[in-house]
Structure formats: C-alpha cells, structure tokens
Image (spheres, helix red, strand yellow):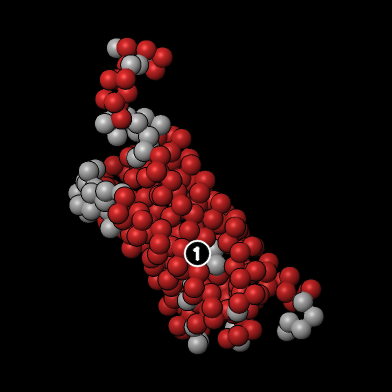
C-alpha cells in the first residue's frame, strides 16, 4: 500500500512503476500524439483563411464557397461517429497513421486544384483524414497517459485547439510569401511527425470491441431523446460558427482589399 504514497517510494518501487505504462504517463509518446493532433487540426483549418484567394483563382461564387464549407464540415465532423465505430472494430489503430497523412496531403494540395470539382474532392479526402484520426487518437492519448488520463487527454485536445488557432496566421503568411501553388510543401511536417509516431507508438488496439448495430441502438435507446436534442443544438451552433468562419475572410477581403472583386 505504500506505493500509493510517492514520498515513500524507493529505487525499486520507481523502477517497478517505470515498467508499468498503465500507471506512469509516457511523456514522449503523449507529446508526439499531441504534436500530430496539432498538425492535423492545423490542416483542417486551411480552407477558411485561404477562401478569398481560391475564389479569385477559380472564379467561385459564394454558393460554391459555401458548398466547400459544407463538405469540410460533413466529412471532418459528422463522419467521426462512424469512424469511431469502425475504429473500435479494428485490431490496429491504422487511422492515427492514415488520418493525418490524408489531412496534410490533400488539404495542402487545395492550391493545386485546377477547378471546383477537384477542389471539392481534395477537401472531401482531407476531411476524411481529420474524421478518421480523432476517435482512435483520443483513445490512445488516454492509454499513454497512465493514471493521469485527464491531464493527458486535455493536453492532447489543447494541441489540436492550438493548431486551429495558428493555422490562419501561418497559412496566410505562407501563401502571401510563397504563393498558393507552393502550399503543398506544408505537408512535410505531418509526414515527418507521422513517421516518428509510427515508430514510437504501438498501434495495437487493446480495447477492440465488435458491437453490432442492434447492440449499439440498444445502448443508446434510453438516452435517445437527449442525444437527438443535443445533436440538434450542436448542429445549429456549428452552422452559425462555420458560416461566420468561412465568410468573414471573404467579407474582409471585399471591404478592405482594394483590388479584390
């Protein structure tokens, strides 16, 4: 029982705990996972600040611009429950590798799109990467946090939020300096991060759980009304937030950039 009191630990106790990853927080693995989350959410936010430039390049209407926002939202957010169910059934957490690569490569390639259809396709695949990464990565963040699961998951989430905040600043500066076509080179940090993560993090899914659709519905049935109400509220809130986020850069460009149409 003395292990519960850190002040009473001796050298042998500490060695024993260091060999128990389920107890001790694995700092390097948590840092890598948080860093990749930062990058994944960074790429997921590339579309909005660069929309005025894309409108000019491809001669997009506001309806087309709104469609891009809808595609990004539907794939990166509403598909996450489906990705979570699929991820729980997998023996290995492949999505923490595939997801960031999809988000990085395809979202960084939006500057290369020659027309609206290709642009929608790139945003769709980039959104799929974001949606597939989050469910399995949150689970792994808890696994590598040991007994400090709350701290580890909050640090992981904070990394993603920081990526969302930094993305508009970095992407607009980068495009202004190097051009929209060179945006694709921003995918390199994610490739490096994913390679490091794949070599350091075990992707085995120890919590694999195969649940049928009928079992899933049975678990949700007692809380179905509350879930529907919460979902409706979240959808309305997200619609307002996404609309503001997507069109504010366009409005600012129209009002304050002299040569913007």
Identify which residue is drawn at 49% across, 54% down.
Answer: 38
Q: In this view, does 213 lie above or below 18?
A: below
Q: Is residue 170 visible?
A: yes
Identify which residue is drawn at 26% across, 25% down.
Answer: 16
Q: Is residue 200 above or below residue 46?
A: above
Q: Which residue lies furthest to the front in this view?
A: 11
Residue 246 in the image, given as x and y percentages of width and height: 61, 67
Identify which residue, 216 or 192, lies in the foreground: 192
Identify which residue, 73 or 169, lies in the foreground: 169
Which quarter of the image is occupied by the N terminus?
A: top left
Residue 70 in the image, given as x and y percentages of width and height: 51, 69
Identify which residue, 104 or 252, lies in the foreground: 104
**Horizontal relation, residue 225 to residue 177: left or right:** left
Residue identified by numbered label 1: 43
Q: How many labels does the image show?
A: 1
**Horizontal relation, residue 64 to residue 176: left or right:** left
Residue 255 in the image, given as x and y percentages of width and height: 78, 74
Image-quadrant location for residue 170: bottom right
Residue 216 in the image, given as x and y percentages of width and height: 26, 47
| Local secondary structure at mark 1 | helix
**Horizontal relation, residue 38 to residue 94: left or right:** right
Q: Can residue 79 be seen in this view?
A: no
Which quarter of the image is occupied by the C terminus?
A: bottom right
Identify which residue is drawn at 44% across, 76% down.
Answer: 122
Identify which residue is drawn at 73% across, 70% down.
Answer: 252
């Amino acid at each position: 029982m003395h292990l519960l009191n850190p002040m009473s630990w001796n050298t042998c106790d500490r060695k024993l705990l260091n060999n128990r990853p389920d107890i001790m927080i694995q700092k390097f693995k948590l840092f890598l996972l948080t860093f990749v989350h930062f990058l994944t959410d960074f790429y997921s936010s590339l579309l909005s600040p660069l929309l005025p430039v894309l409108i000019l390049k491809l001669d997009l209407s506001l309806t087309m611009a709104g469609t891009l926002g809808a595609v990004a939202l539907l794939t990166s957010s509403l598909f996450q429950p489906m990705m979570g169910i699929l991820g729980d059934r997998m023996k290995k957490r492949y999505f923490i590798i595939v997801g960031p690569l999809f988000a990085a490569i395809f979202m960084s390639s939006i500057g290369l799109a020659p027309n609206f259809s290709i642009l929608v396709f790139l945003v769709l695949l980039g959104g799929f990467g974001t949606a597939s990464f989050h469910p399995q990565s949150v689970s792994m963040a808890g696994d590598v946090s040991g007994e400090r699961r709350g701290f580890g998951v909050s640090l992981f989430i904070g990394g993603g939020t920081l990526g969302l905040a930094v993305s508009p600043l970095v992407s607009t500066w980068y495009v202004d300096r190097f051009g929209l076509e060179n945006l694709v080179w921003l995918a390199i940090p994610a490739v490096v991060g994913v390679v490091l993560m794949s070599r350091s993090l075990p992707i085995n899914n120890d919590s694999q759980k195969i649940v049928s659709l009928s079992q899933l519905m049975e678990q949700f049935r007692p809380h179905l009304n509350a879930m529907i109400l919460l979902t409706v509220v979240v959808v309305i809130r997200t619609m307002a937030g996404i609309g503001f986020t997507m069109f504010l850069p366009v409005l600012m460009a129209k009002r304050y950039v002299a040569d913007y149409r």
